[in-house]
Image: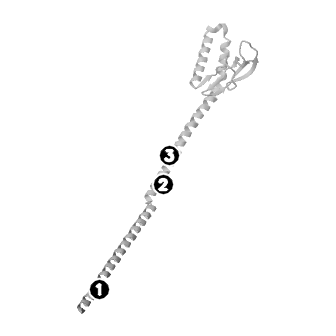
Amino acid sequence: MAKNKKTDATETVEEMENKEEVDTAEEVTEESVEEKQTEDVDSETDEDTVDDEKDPRDELIDALTDKYKRTFAEFDNFRKRSEKEKAAMFDMGVKSVAEKILPVVDSFERGLLTVGDDADSAFAVGMDKVYKQFVKALEDAGITPIEALGKEFDPEFHNAVMHVDDENLGENVVAEELQKGYMLHDTVLRHSMVKVAN
């Protein structure tokens, strides 16, 4: 029985030692798991920090790309604005010259109306050719005459200076054109001076 007690005590001591070893092993395992989790968290934090802190070269590339895009957009806007201004200046120049030439064309028209019987003379033929050349040059520059005679009066194109009673014409119809009007592309260069029927 004493042997049995001794054996039981030895077994109990061995069981306790085994239990302590298991507890120590579990503690070691728990510690290593905690260390590993801490390392994982630290590595994630390091990666986040790396993401938050961009490489200065990437920041420089982004800044230069943005600057390039803005400069290109500004230059494109400048180019478009310059083209519009150039076209506007050209039209303004054409308008200025045309306003000075139109009275000369009017004088040619009045001179051709007075030719009468001498229409076949060299002088009349020469005037007619010069007049046609003037009209062609104006058309090439985008200047065209406004059709008025027999048309309904339109204050955007016609300037009524007289009213006449004419039963042959309808109301508000242009009876006579006193001075020809001209258009420069889509804008009125000079209104037609007309007589309007009531």
Vertical comparison of 3 with 142: above or below: below
Residue corresponding to mark 2: 63
Task: Give the spatial CA distance, label 2 vs label 3.
Answer: 14 Å
Residue corresponding to mark 1: 12
| Residue 74 picture location, percent across and down | 53, 45
Camera-near label (1 vs 2) is 1
| Three-letter code for the amino acid on which mark 1 is drawn | Thr
Quick one: quadrant of the N terminus? Answer: bottom left
Q: Residues within 10 Å of mark 2 (few under 14, many from 20)?
A: few
Q: Are marks 2 and 3 in contact (CB under 8 Å)?
A: no
Residue 35: quadrant of the picture: bottom left
Camera-near label (3 vs 1) is 1
Viewer-side residue, 107 vs 12: 12
Residue 34: quadrant of the picture: bottom left
Q: Secondary structure at mark 2?
A: helix
Q: Secondary structure at mark 3?
A: helix
Vertical comparison of 55 with 143: above or below: below
| Residue 122 picture location, percent across and down | 60, 10
Q: Residue at x 46, y 62 (%)?
A: 52
Residue corresponding to mark 3: 72
